[in-house]
Image (cartoon, rainbow, N blue to C red):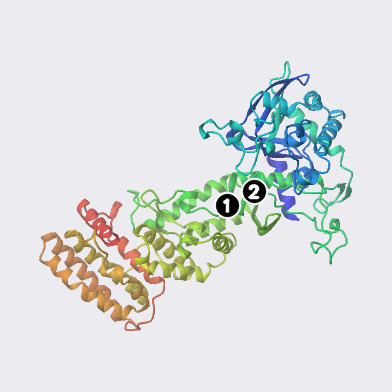
Amino acid sequence: MSWIQKLSETYDRCAGHEPDGAELLMPVSHTTQQAHIEIVLDAEGGFRRASVLGKSVSTTLIPCTEESGGRAGSKPVNHPLCDKLQYVAGDYGDFGGEVTSGFSSNPDEPHNKYKESLGAWANSQYGHPKLNAILHYVQAGRVVADLIANKVLHVDATGKLLKQWAGDKDQTPPIFKAITTTQTQEDSFVRWCVEQAGNLVSATWQDSELIAAWVSYYQSTQEKRGYCMVTGRETTLAVQHPAKLRHAGDKAKLISSNDTSGYTFRGRFLEADEVQSVEFLVTQKAHNALRWLIARQSYRNGDQVFVSWAVSGRPVPDPFASTLDLFGVATIGDPATSIADTAQVFALRLKKAIAGYRSKLDPTEDIVVMGLDSATPGRLAITFYRELKGSEFLGCIESWHAKCAWPQNFGKESKFVGAPAPRDIAEAAYGRRLDDKLRKSVVERLLPCIVDGQSIPRDLVESVTRRVCNRVGLESWEWEKCLGIACALFRGYHTDRSYQMAIEPDRTTRDYLYGRLLAIADGIEGYALYLTDEGKKRETTAARLMQRFADRPFSTWRNIELALGPYKSRLQTGSEKSAAFLAKRKRLLDEVITTLDSIEGRTSDAPLTGEFLLGYHCQRQAFRPSGAGATSEDDVLKEDVIETASNS
């Protein structure tokens, strides 16, 4: 139960100290609801006006009980103040309103129970003048009639509430725009405003005195007492626990036990209370804190949610963000950054960014990383949970972004050096159209790699490598993105090999050298095609045969090298610049082949590992000098042209 303790502590430390612009932590015994209608009353409970609410202002803070906060089924329990028409309107049935199926035998039951609960609160020592006004108006039984008179609700020729609008779409009444397609006017949710002389706050959901009054009143009605497993003290226990954690319509609960005939707890315990018992205030604070954290700083993927936070409320880096989104460091194309010193510049900027978090986060600060998911609509599970200290958490984040750092090309405006986000890794491994279940699985498997420092799953590394090798099956922009991700994962998986982000002339492994050969051949043919405008029409031989080259490099290289013949001749007989370019590339090609001939296994046709992508990418990057390493604008332009031609 440590997660409840940490969340409750977070609530206590953050309530009233929310960052500027952040949503306020919800008071205990309250929830939010999407309201459709706002009714304004005077201090005596007289009707003044009503209006339909737009979706941008419909979210409303309302008091709730344990039962109403997680209500469901055929007989949902009423909220104590704001609710649907079947509860607040005594004349609901007079205009054809239909109650939920559980109340069909006694249609007046929901309204009577609403009046009973509202009256008990208004007449208690925690009553409030606004409650008296609302109760007086509700008891008059004219809610629906007044709304119809003010053209908020609409009736048919028989005087019954319209189920749906069948008229001109351009003249659709606002109420039919406010409700969803599965709702009718009868499902409209009502909130209250009471205008009083000398009181500038008429909205009940904004009145701090009314909010505090409900909290005190509801706590005074709690009767169940026992031992709290979180605080370790005898106190008032919660009967039910809140829902609506991930969004307003979320009915899944972390703690629930509504099965008294199945096997939810039977077989181990006689009663549900024996499984766990939590103090009412503790569970309210914990769930409100979790709801607040999810809304402002979580990673979402359908029903899957991950959230990381400091118990003190101080900012922490997002484990699910890419280096660009998280730190914005080492952007490719920065005039101050060249390929040769990219790693050094990146490391310095990364350390500086992490130091910024360390200056605000105490080394002993409690950090929590929590993952939630639901297999069914009513049950929510904690799929991942870690408690770390501030220094440990920041160290893991820094390690992940450092070991998986690689030049990434996510588009014209998203070229950076760093680690990709888990979501991008999932798409690179299995394609952009992967289903939610597979995406969830990949993210869950990567989280321990980020937070715990575990090794990257080997099958993910190999899957991304295979997709990159199938170059003809990807669009050029997607292939560029996947290439950077594949290199980042391979480098992060083989940290013991100390791969550099720049070309390594002294690295004489078979796979690395074959990757360099492929980049050189790609560049020669790409430049020749560009000079004859053929680069816009077809890919290079190296690009087309990349998959085969990865599977059988020795035999495939012979085909690629023979295909270079006509293009070498074309460059040789061309302009002086093209001949000089060819001579430069031929020297480099001979150097790599000579080195490759000197190592064991050169003639082997065994498949290449992902290391050849590192050699390919680094060699291609070396052809594009920038910053301090640039020779001339003409050379830089020429190398950009080669890359463009080979990727078109």
Left or right position of 590 against 429:
left
Left or right position of 63 against 512:
right
Residue 126, horizontal then vertical, whole percent: 84, 29
> Is residue 38 visible from the viewing direction of this image?
yes
Left or right position of 120 against 512:
right
Quadrant showing the N terminus: bottom right
Q: Nearer the viewer, residue 579 or 379?
A: 379
**Residues at marks 2 and 1, CA–CA distance in whole angstroms:** 9 Å
Residue 213, horizontal then vertical, whole percent: 80, 31
Q: Please tell me whether residue 310 is drawn above or below residue 583 in the rendered image.
A: above
Q: Quadrant of residue 65?
A: top right
Q: Quadrant of residue 55?
A: top right
The residue pinned by badge 2 equals 246
Q: Please tell me whether residue 601 is drawn above or below residue 132 in the rendered image.
A: below
Q: Residue at x 56, y 45 (%)?
A: 359
Q: Please tell me whether residue 493 is drawn above or below residue 133 in the rendered image.
A: below
Q: Are marks 2 and 1 in contact (CB under 8 Å)?
A: yes
Q: Residues within 10 Å of mark 2 (few under 14, many from 20)?
A: many
Q: Earlier in the sequence, mark 2 or mark 1?
A: 2
Q: Nearer the viewer, residue 491 or 440?
A: 440
Q: Residue at x 73, y 15 (%)?
A: 197
Residue 178, horizontal then vertical, whole percent: 60, 35
Q: Residue at x 30, y 78 (%)?
A: 556
The residue pinned by badge 1 equals 300
| Amino acid type shown at disc 1 | Arg
Q: Residues within 10 Å of mark 1 (few under 14, many from 20)?
A: some
Q: Nearer the viewer, residue 335 or 98?
A: 98
